Amino acid sequence: MISAEAEPYAKAGGLADMVVGLSRALLKHGVDVRILIPCYSEVRKSTPLVKLLDLPHIKMGTQAYSAAIYVESHQTPPLTYFISNHELFDREGIYNEPASGEGFADNFERFNFFMQAALDALPRISWKPDLLHCHDSQTALIPAFLKLQRMAESFYQNIATVFTIHNVAYQGIFEAGKFPLTGLPPELFYPMSPFEYYGRINLMKAGILYADLLNTVSPTYAREIQENDEYGAGLAAVLRQREGKFFGILNGIDTIEWDPRTDRLLYANYSERDLSGKLVNKQQLQESCGLPVGDAPLIGMISRLVDQKGLDLLFRAKRELARLECQWVILGTGVARYHQMLQELAEENSGKFWVRFAFDNKLAHRIEAGCDLFLMPSRYEPCGLNQMYSMRYGTVPIVRNTGGLADTVTEFHPTSKKGNGFKFQRHAPEPFLEALHRALDIWRNRELWSQLVQNCMCQDFSWDRRASEYIGLYHKAIAQK
Ligand code: ADP
C-alpha cells in the first residue's frame, strides 16, 4: 500500500482508516502486505522510529533531496515504512497549512518525492511486491513511473498496480511548469495527454489511465462518477475510457474499534441483546451537551463541514426543523461559512441544537452511541463510514441516496419490517424533511423502532468480506500483466 495516510500515524480522513483496515484484513487472508507513508512530523512526535537505511537523493529541478526510510522500533504487522525528508515533511499538517487550511505550495514536490523514494525503497528493503496498491492523487503517478520510467529495470517489471479513488473531487491539479520535476520526458505532457487537464497537470487522471486496474470505494459511486460529469468532477469521460477495468468495492469498518460491547470511550457498553446501556449513553450525552435529559429523539451528525456533506439543507429547512420536537448534536470542523450557519442554528434553537467545532474522536464515539438517529445528507459520498458506525451502534441513519450511502442503507418498510434506515433522493429541503418525518413516525412506534434497531445492529460491515473482493481484484491485475 502506498498512501499519504495510515491510521494511527497520520490521519486526515477516511483514507487512513481504509488503508489500515484493509491491510489488517489482508494479513488475515495470508497476504504479505506492507504500507509506505511519508514521515510527517506528527509521525516522528508520536512514534519511536529507527532508521532502516538511506535512499538515493531524489533530484527535482536543480535541487537534490535526501531520502531515508524508517520503521517503528516495535511494530506489529502490517509493517509500515516511513519515507523521510526533513524539508518536505517535517512540518505541521499533512496536506494543508494548519493556519490557513490552504494546500502547501510545494505539495507537488512533496508527493512526487514520496512516490519516487517509495519506488527506490523497494529493492533496498529486498522486498518485491506482486502489486502496488496506490491511493488517491498523492500516489497516482506510480503506475506511470513503472510503465514509463522504470520499465528497463528488471526489479520493477511485472509489478502490477491497482489505483483506488477515494474521492474524485480531489485530483491533484498543478501548474504545467512542474511536470519536468517528475523526470518523465517533457514530450509526454501535451494537450489531451494522460497527464494534462485544461493546460495543467492532473495526477488523478494519470493514475486512472496508467493503473492496470482501478476502483473506487462503492459500486454506486463508481457508476455515478462515470455517468454524470458533475459527480465525476470533470473526469467522467476519462473513467469511461477504462470501462471493464474500473470497479466499485465498498469500504469496511474497524469492527474492533467500533464495537458498542467493548468501546472504552462510551459511558456504558451495550449489545443488540441488551440495549439498556444505549439509554445511559443518550442521557449522558444530553447532559454533557446541556440538552434537556429526556425522551426527545436525538439526532447526531459528525462531519467535515464542507459543501460535499450537504449541510445547507439544515439551514434551508430551519423553520420546519425549529418546530420539530427533536434534539440535535453536531460535531465537525471545516469551512467558516458552515461554522457560522451552525452557530446561528444553535443560538436560535438553544436547548435543542448543540454544536461543537472540533475533531474529537471520543465525542464521535459517544454521539454514535447516544443518538437515536444519524443524519448524512451528502451531495455525494464515495463510501461514508459514519452510517456504518451508526448502524453498529443501533443508531438509525437518514441519508441522501448517493454513493456508498445508497449501497449500505435500505429504506425501512413498516409492513415488511425490512430495511435499516431512511433515504431521500433529491438534494432539497422537502424530500429531506419527508425522510425525517418518516423516521420520527417509526421512532414513536416502539415495536417497529426496536425491529429497525435490530436490523441495523446485525449488519456485517467488516473488512473481512471486503478483503476477499480486493484479493480478487489483485489477482485480476496480476494476471493481466
Ligand atoms: P470523509 O472521509 O469524507 O471525511 P467518512 O465518513 O468516509 O468521510 O470518514 C470520516 C471519518 O472521520 C470518520 O471516521 C468520522 O467519524 C471521522 N470524523 C470526521 N469529522 C470528525 C470530527 N469532527 N471529530 C471526530 N471524528 C470525525
Image: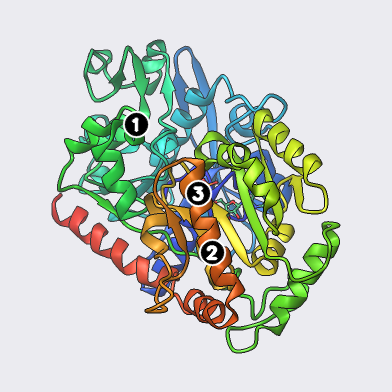
| Residue 439 numbered mark, or none | 2
Please name which of the two marks, 1 or 3, marks the residue nearer to the observer.
3
Q: For the residues marked 1 and 3, what is the alpha-carbon distance in whole angstroms?
A: 21 Å
Q: How is the image coloured?
A: rainbow
**Residue contact between numbered discs 1 and 3, judged by CB atoms under 8 Å:** no
**How many C-alpha atoms fall within 10 Å of the one at disc 1: few (<14), some, or many (≥20)?**
some
Which is nearer the N-term, disc 1 or disc 3?
Answer: 1
| Residue type at numbered disc 3 | Phe
Question: In the rendering, at what x and y percent does residue 314 appear?
Answer: 61, 42
* Residue found farthest to the bottom: 273
* Badge 3 or badge 2: first in the primary sequence: 3
Q: Residue at x 51, y 81 (%)?
A: 451
Which of 260 and 276 lies nearest the eye of the viewer? 276
Is disc 2 in contact with disc 1, using a CB cutoff of under 8 Å? no
| Residue shown at the point (36%, 29%) measured from the top left | 203
Which residue was labeled with disc 3? 432
Percent across and percent down for residue 319 are 66, 41
Q: CA distance from mark 2 to mark 1?
A: 30 Å
In three-dimensional space, the C-alpha distance between marks 3 and 2, rounded to whole angstroms, equals 11 Å
State the SS at label 1: helix
The answer to whether 240 appears left or right of 41 in the picture is: left
Whether residue 323 is situated above or below residue 260 in the rendered picture: above
Mark 3 C-beta to ligand 1 under 8 Å = no
Instruction: Identify the amino acid type marked 2.
Output: Ala
> Given the image, on which type of amino acid does mark 1 rest?
Glu
* Residue sitting at x 70%, y 39%: 342
Res. 212 visible in picture: yes
Instruction: Please tell me how crowded label 2 is: few (under 14), some (14-19), or many (20+) other residues with Cα within 10 Å.
Output: many
Q: Which residue is mark 1?
A: 230
Observer-nearest of 171 and 120:
171
